[in-house]
Amino acid sequence: CLSWEMASLLLRGCTSAKGSASSSRTLSEKRFNTCLWKETHSIASGRSVPSVSEIQNRMKEILSKYRNGVWMSKIAQIYEETYREELSTTVLRQLEHWPHVCTVEKVCTGDQTYGIVYPIKRIPPAVKSNTEQDKASQNVTPSKADPQLKTSRETESASCSSDFKQNVVSILVKYPSGLWADALPKLYQDTYQRKFPEGILNNLQVLSDICVADYVSNAPQKAILYVKTQSCTDENLNVTGKVQVPDGVKATAEQQREEPKEQYPESISSVPPLIIPSEGPVSVLVIEVNNTNELIIRYVGKDYSGAQEQMEDKMKAYYSKNSTASQITFPSVGQLVAVHTEEEAWLRARIISVENKRLKVYYVDHGFSEVIESSRAYKLHKQFCSLPFQVAKCKLAGLEVFCDDPLLVKAVELQTYCKIFAVEILERSDIPLFVLYDTSGEDDVNINATCLKALYDKSYELNLQVDTLYSNVRVTSILSDGNLYCQLPSEGLSKLSEVLQKIEDYLLHKTSEFNVSQPFCGKICLFLCKGKWTRVEITIIQSRRALGVRFMDTGRVAYVKVSDLREIPSQFLREVIKIPPQAIKCCLADLPPDSGMWTPEAVLWLRDHLNCAFFLKVVKQDGSKGIAHVYLFAPEDFPNKDRSVNRRIVNADLWKHQKDVFLSVAPAGGGSTKGTGDAALQLNQGRLEKSDSLEPAVEPRGADSATDMPPPLPLSEVGGFMDVYVSVACHPGHFIVQPWKEIHNLEVLMEEMILYYSMAEERPVNVGTNKLYAAKIENRWYRVIVKEILRKGFLSVYVLDYGKHEVISIDKVQPLLDKFRKFPFQAIKAQLAGVRSQQWSEEASIIFRNRVEKKPLVAQIQAINESTNSWDRKIVTYLVDTSLPDTDIWIHDFVSQSLAELSEAD
């Protein structure tokens, strides 16, 4: 039995935030839009929230395509696929209050209630009693009835006669595993030499007395038809005298038919559809691999595998008391049943074939089939129909074109079968598009990218041999730890050049047609570098515009714009994918053990001396790390080891690390930072993975201009309202807010900084306190001011747009260019109004932080304390949470109430 413990998940990216309402509105007018903020906000802001009228028009447009209605649970998915925006759950709650937009019908199944949304012109059918229907039919006289309607009814009545239905039954019984509805007309015509009546496929409800329709999409024709039990069919067709039933069996059958049908639903239509998890991290268990476009999975979590286990426990308890009364006498194909397994478990199943006293059943929550004795099948009680069937399907991103390739399918099966994975959902559809991650080890493994390697042509792989000499070797990338990536002349490199040249000729006038619309980690794309197309693999989704990529055939890494990437044309895709990466990872062999960590000077020396073709000799292979230990020789120096690059770099005296010194902090406004050693702390960190074609022009800056500041951030007047986002909350006496309306512009600035500094060569920097710099913190670039220079090459900095204090390595700072100084700093220091200043306890601080941090709120400014430095300004403000539809929560009241409760507890 498999454990359902949730796997640890990789958190990636952030969703687009929708903009805010105007700050001039009253609090009550803000409630609806603030609900949208709360449910869709993340710090990576995007487009503004569409107006209510625009959302309503969009809903009308969607519903116009679903004349027969659509499940409310699917509305959000359809909306996102149509408009590329998330639909707030607040909107879904409002639908039934928008009669001018749509009609919502509530459907009860077991203990659950589901909604079906219809277009405004579509009135959901009311359920009437037979008496009411009779009265209604009597009230319509022939003279008043619509002639066209009368003709239509007569046609439908004729087409759905008992003989017609009996013929349909005769066809369906030949297909115990079900028959596609759109195949029925041709079979009917071929069998009976009569045309299948028009309109039946658009209204399969007229056949509901003889068969079960299993809809697999919104199109009526996309349904699978299963014939009902012989007894039910005969009864509905008024067929008598055809079957002789022994009295005992007949009595049992009559008793069974007298039981309320709603107690034991037989159709899968009585079970709600399975909804893809919409919140929090998602994990799945892979239970079968048909191909990469059809993995059979189960979702892991409280509302999925956890709920299923609870249901099966309840089934065991129920059927142990009611097994005799619930036994099935006349099983039929398509019928839902409860199966008593040999392991004494009770599982939900669907009958897919009947042969004598043996049934073939499909376990709808476990994804496999089994032949059982009919005595082990029991009627499924309605209380066990409220949970959706847990078996689902998915397809793997990046593998769609090769979905049936035997090597790929085998690799996917070996990597995934009966294992739990974290999921990145790229596309929500009937069969969603996933990227799977194995998070069980120290590093997260991208399963899609790993399995794609199964398509590599091994004849193109580079396998270095120990004690072998290779000539014309190019060093393509040098890492900060001294490791190298090298290119060797090879058949694979020649083939790659040939294919890329064909792609270049093909894309000469078609590049815009192949823009990458759906980037994801592990995806292989094309990037134009030095006028030539190169292969890159996406490694980091930094934002909507910026991506981290690895050049597969040089080993370099860089950040690039999404708009600069191109899809590989389909006719060249297999040729491109089958060639393994043509860069070999190496390190210099036999360096002294006391050389320690590589200094920037050693890395720069290596880069300056490895800019031509070399001889390479392999002395050792480290298979565990995938790295070769090598000697490099200039052509004129081979085979003299004393003239090798290895010996020359050791003798170049580049390995002396500066001892730890304490650097005194210069007074504010001072231009230098003095220490016990050098007069100034100067960095000379060369770009370790230089990207010539990606490098933008260097923008010069004078020493004095480093103090230039952007204009101060405009604030609302005292007493006015302002939409804000709380980025940091320490306690009510100190928190940081950002103006909501500027978050999108801030994110654009952040993306531009990422693209610039990741591509630019690092330059020498004189670091001083109270000066502005760009700093790299957790793979993103921020505007910071240096507050203090610490020991061991560390800096204390203040992040000017987010209000955070950070300690970073001194080699993570670069000059802040003029173009990044024009936008006002976004962090505003704040204090909560309406509460008495005090020493805030840890409990009170935590309560306050959990209530406001990372949330959009409305601020009413009571005072502004100005300062010489714009980042030291402080406001005293009320905060209001307007996310609830009917109530505004003033945070100072909440804090006061919490303090009182804490005092009582003490």
Image (cartoon, rainbow, N blue to C red):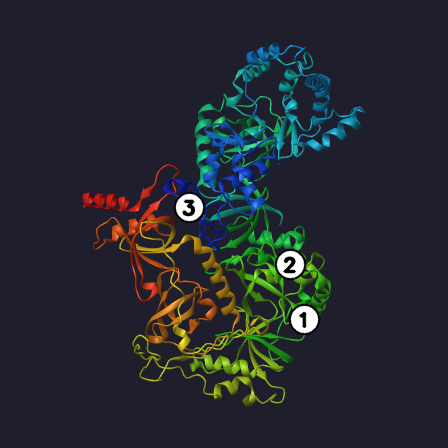
Q: Which mark lies nearer to you, 3 or 2?
A: 3
The mark nearer the N terminus, 3 or 2, is 3
Residue 446, given in percent of the width and then of the height, sits at 54, 57
In the image, 690 versus 743, the foreground residue is: 743
Spot occupied by residue 513 in the image (x, y as percentages of width and height): 67, 56
Q: Tell me if mark 2 has few (under 14), some (14-19) or many (20+) residues whose alpha carbon lies within 10 angstroms of its own.
A: many
CA gap between label 1 and label 2 equals 21 Å
Give the residue number, with chain letter if any, for mark 2: 567
Whether pointer 1 and pointer 2 mark residues with C-beta atoms closer than 8 Å, the reply is no
Label 1 neighbourhood size at 10 Å, few (<14), some (14-19), many (20+)? many
233 and 590: which is toward the camera: 233
In this picture, residue 892 sits left or right of residue 388: left
> Which residue is tagged 3?
38
Viewer-nearest residue: 118 or 179 = 118
Residue that appears at 51% across and 83% down = 605
Which residue position is annotated with label 1? 493
